[in-house]
Structures are given as C-alpha cells and as structure tokens.
C-alpha cells in the first residue's frame, strides 16, 4: 500500500471528538499516551497516539470513525494490548480506539450453544461465566488479558487448536463498523449460512485494518468434565517431533500438543524456579487430553505411551493431580516471559504442514548455525506452529539487528518452501509486514490491497499494519 499522509491532530479536533462522544471517554493524559504506545511486541518501537478514545457503544464507535474519516485521522483499534506483532501500536499517531469499556456479555444461549459478546470481553472472564452454565469457549491462549475482539482480529490460535481449531472456527457472526461509520452485520446465532459473501471470515484476522469489530457471536461447547496432561521427555528432538503426526491419528486426538526443546526448558525452569520431570532430556511433549471423565481419557494412555516410547520417549508422566497439571500449563504460558532475559523478543510464529515439522525444525537449526544465531524452540506442535525468538550472542546492537533481519527472512523463505507461511496465529502487525510478499504472491497481494481500498478508501484504519508501505 502507498504510504498516506494524514491530518495533523489539533485541539479543535479534540474538542469536536469530546462533543461527539463525551470528554469522559477521551484521554490525552501523558501516562495514557505512553501506555497505549506499545503492545507486547518486544522489539517494536513505541509510538504515542494523539488521543486515547474509549467508546462504550457501537454508536460511539460509528461516530468516532465517521469523524476520523471526514477529518483524515488514523485510527488504531486495541483490545487487551497483548498482541506480539505490534498490531495495536498507533504507528501513525491519531486516535487510539480502545475497546476495553465495551466488555459486556450480552447473551449466553445454552440451547443454541452460542454467546453474543462485546469485543472488550476478556476471554478468560467469558469462560468463568460459561463454566457456571457448564459451557465452554475452547480457544485458550496464554495471554490472560487478551480480549475476544483482539483474538478475533488476529485469528488467535493457542493451545487447544489441535482439537477445536483456531478463533475463526469458533465465530459464527460479527457486528462491525466500517471506516466511514457504517455498521454492518455478518452471520449470527445460526450454524450455517450461504447468503452472500462471508464477510465474517474476511474481517476475522484482518488486524483492525478493515473494520472495528463491535460484537461477536461465538460457538460454545459443553464444559469438558475432565482434562489430563501428559509430560513426555524424549532423548531426541527429532523423536519428539516425529511423534506428533502419530498422535494425531488416534481416535480421541489430543486437545493440545505442545513441544519444547531442552534449552527452552532450561531457561523456563530458571524463570519458574521449577524443574520439569525428565529434566536434562533433549525434547519434551506436553499432551493435553479431555473427555467425559478421567477414566475416559486414561484408557488412551497405554496407546499414547507406546507411540511415544517407540519414538524415543525415555519416560512418561501423567500427574493426575490438579495442582501439578496447573503447574504444567503455567510453565508453558510463561515461556514467552522467560525469553525476555535475552532482550526484547521477536515473536516468530511460522506454520508448516504438520507432517513437515521435523524437517522444518531441522532446517531452522541448520540456518541458525549458519547465521551464528541461537534459537530456543517451542510451539504448538499439533498445529505445525513453531515459536522462537532468535538470540545473537556476542555481537554489537547494530550487527544484531542486521543478522536477525537476514536470518528471519531466510527462515520465512524456508517455511514457505515447505508449504507453510510466516504467521500461524500472531498476525503481521507492524513487525512482520515487511515479509508479507514471502508468504503471499503478488496477485494475491493485489487483491488484498483492493479489498482494503473497498473497505477503507481513506486508509484510516490501522495504517502501517499487514502491508509494507
Ligand atoms: C504471554 C503471551 C502469550 C500469548 N499466547 C498466544 C497464543 O498462545 N496464541 C495466540 O494466538 N496468541 C498469543 N499471544 C498473542 C496475543 O495474546 C494475541 O494476538 C491476542 O489475540 C491479542 O488480543 P488483544 O485483545 O490483546 O489484542 P490487541 O493486542 O489489543 O490487538 C491485536 C490486533 O487486533 C486489533 N484489534 C483489537 N481489537 C479489535 C477490534 N475490536 N476490532 C478490530 N480490530 C481489533 C488491533 O488493532 C491489533 O491489530 C500471546 C501474547 C502474550 C503476551
């Protein structure tokens, strides 16, 4: 996309905005401008917005966007600010539109297994409410304060995607506001629809560049009655990774299937002050199973253990105890945090076909040696989604930047060559946009940019994201 010039944000614009949605929903406090200048993309450069706007209704979102369109002011939507690709950073200033106050659970319908929620609802809170009704929304990401609007806009994946799919598979409909303030509806509380284009799926994962999502209708499931976690150390990384497709052939496939290599585990152990069972082994799988009862799940343990042992598992831990299971999940959730000791992390979240994980992991290791880079691998192995942040030891800051950029470009090319793509769940935001043409061919990119023009002709919505301008 061509880089656009925007209007300079003025005092009179601020006054007009206050007239439209009330002074109480607008902030220009220094602390707010600083807090909303960053998200969780460690390596991103902070950018302050000119104003933080916190609407409380769709109508307000509509008025703000209508005004911003008319005045040519950039608008960056934001949920919980836990994104790791810089998607919520207002790189061109203007209005930071935080959806945090739109956090009502509008409706839970146990008969239809649906809920209608506002975008600022924190996913964990939704699940607390649903549990009272024995219901469950299955997308589980490790960021506790992420919102449903943010999950929808990044198409978040998380740990349970192996069995239930990613956010896209859980959303039946949305209400959204277009750049000019028009309110649209797509899909709803019904499970099938062949009425026109599927705009829901187009807007999901669009990182706030096409529309602002103001309501989400999600699919629900009966709350699983039992969850068991297995932790399996392997004598080789290859063995662990090659076990993954075999486990996916079982009748009751794991809900989650995470992998870690030894160096990653060691860093995370220090951070968590906790030693995992099988400490010192080369690689580990964490297998999450759910079912109607523990007995229902345990009947598969024999089969899982056999598959794992045939591929080099040296032990097989099935803790059963709720506290230990919680500890394993927290251990996994804190891996990103533990990596911060190496400096500001870049969040690589490449995805390859699941059958290619072993080959891809081998390639990453090989290329890392070639570039003098250290990688701490982990990931949602059951989804073919590999996470790491490259570390460049013993170099000066400028060299590190250059080495990382070249290394990442190579890694992205290798992953695409294996039939994968550069982001599996975090999105491109501002941090990975320069690599988009590695993952998307020029014709596809042309169509994407035409879609952007159709939705947002003035390009006021989240400029500087996804597309390399
Ligand atoms: C510790 C940690 C663990 C994580 N684990 C995972 C994981 O397992 N899986 C995973 O997928 N991600 C993970 N993430 C990344 C992050 O949590 C997700 O990308 C999440 O979906 C972001 O939600 P958010 O509410 O914080 O959105 P934000 O960061 O605020 O925004 C993300 C993007 O969505 C846009 N946006 C937000 N709300 C709206 C809206 N209502 N309408 C239009 N656009 C909007 C923003 O402009 C931005 O582009 C993790 C992050 C951290 C820090």
Image: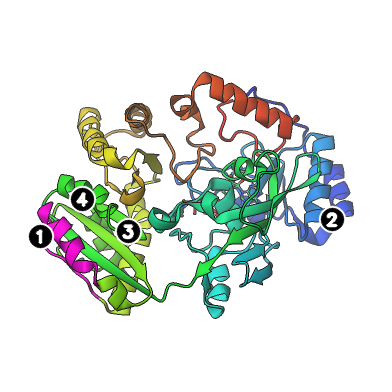
Image disc number at residue 21: 2
Which tag, 1 or 4, sits closer to the chain's start? Answer: 4
Quarter assignment of residue 279: bottom left
Q: Is residue 403 above or below residue 269?
A: above
Q: Look at discs 3 and 4 and give the one toward the viewer.
A: 3
Q: Look at discs 2 and 3 and give the one toward the viewer.
A: 3
Could you say where residue 299 lies in the image, as x and y percent from the top left?
A: 24, 71
Q: Residues within 10 Å of mark 2 (few under 14, many from 20)?
A: many
Quickly name the residue at label 3: 253
Residue 35 shows in this picture: no
The residues bearing labels 4 and 2 have C-alpha atoms spaced at a distance of 55 Å
Quarter assignment of residue 126: bottom right
The residues bearing labels 1 and 4 have C-alpha atoms spaced at a distance of 13 Å
Image disc number at residue 243: 4
Q: Is residue 122 above or below residue 386?
A: below
Q: Is residue 363 magenta?
A: no
Magenta span? 299-319
The residues bearing labels 3 and 4 have C-alpha atoms spaced at a distance of 13 Å
**Residue contact between numbered discs 4 and 2, judged by CB atoms under 8 Å:** no
Residue 86 shows in this picture: yes
Q: Which secondary structure, mark 2?
A: helix
The residues bearing labels 1 and 2 have C-alpha atoms spaced at a distance of 62 Å
Q: Residues within 10 Å of mark 1 (few under 14, many from 20)?
A: some
The residues bearing labels 2 and 3 have C-alpha atoms spaced at a distance of 49 Å
**Residue contact between numbered discs 1 and 3, judged by CB atoms under 8 Å:** no
Which tag, 4 or 2, sits closer to the chain's start? Answer: 2
Image disc number at residue 114: none
């Amino acid at each position: 996309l061509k880089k656009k010039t925007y209007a300079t944000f003025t005092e009179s614009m601020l006054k007009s905005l206050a007239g439209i949605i009330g002074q109480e929903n607008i902030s220009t406090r220094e602390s707010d401008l600083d807090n909303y200048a960053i998200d969780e993309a460690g390596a991103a450069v902070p950018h302050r917005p000119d104003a933080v706007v916190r609407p409380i209704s769709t109508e307000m979102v509509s008025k703000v966007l209508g005004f911003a369109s008319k005045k040519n002011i950039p608008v960056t939507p934001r949920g919980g600010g836990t994104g790791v690709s810089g998607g919520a950073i207002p790189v061109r200033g203007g209005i930071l539109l935080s959806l945090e106050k739109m956090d009502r659970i509008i409706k839970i319908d146990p008969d239809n297994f649906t809920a209608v929620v506002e975008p600022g609802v924190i996913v964990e809170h939704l699940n607390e409410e649903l549990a009272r009704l024995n219901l469950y929304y299955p997308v589980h990401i490790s960021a506790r304060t992420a919102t449903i609007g943010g999950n929808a806009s990044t198409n978040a994946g998380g740990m349970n995607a192996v069995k239930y799919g990613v956010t896209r598979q859980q959303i039946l409909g949305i209400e959204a506001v277009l750049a000019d303030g028009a309110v649209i509806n797509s899909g709803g509380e019904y499970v099938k629809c062949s009425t026109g284009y599927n705009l829901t799926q187009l807007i999901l994962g669009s990182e706030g560049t096409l529309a602002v999502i103001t309501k989400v209708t999600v699919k629900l499931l009966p709350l699983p009655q039992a969850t068991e976690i297995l932790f399996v150390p392997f004598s080789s990384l290859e063995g662990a990774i090659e076990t993954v497709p075999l486990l996916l052939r079982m009748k009751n496939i794991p809900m989650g299937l995470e992998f870690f290599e030894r160096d990653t585990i060691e860093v995370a152990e220090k951070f968590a002050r906790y030693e995992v069972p099988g400490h010192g082994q080369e690689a580990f799988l964490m297998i999450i199973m759910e079912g109607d009862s523990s007995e229902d799940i345990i009947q598969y343990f024999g089969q899982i253990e056999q598959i794992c042992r045939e591929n080099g598992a040296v032990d097989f831990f099935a803790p059963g105890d709720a506290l230990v299971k919680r500890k394993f999940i927290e251990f996994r959730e804190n891996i990103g945090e533990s990596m911060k000791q190496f400096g500001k992390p870049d969040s690589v979240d490449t995805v390859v076909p699941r059958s290619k994980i072993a080959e891809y992991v081998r390639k990453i290791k090989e290329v890392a040696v070639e570039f003098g880079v250290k990688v701490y691998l982990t990931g949602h192995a059951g989804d073919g989604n590999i996470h790491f942040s490259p570390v460049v030891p013993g170099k000066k800051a400028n060299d590190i930047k250059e080495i990382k950029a070249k290394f990442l470009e190579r890694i992205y090319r290798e992953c695409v060559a294996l039939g994968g793509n550069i982001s599996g769940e975090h999105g491109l935001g501002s941090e990975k946009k320069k690599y988009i043409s590695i993952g998307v061919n020029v014709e596809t990119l042309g169509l994407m940019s035409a879609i952007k023009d159709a939705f947002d002709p003035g390009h006021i919505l989240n400029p500087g994201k996804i597309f390399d301008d």
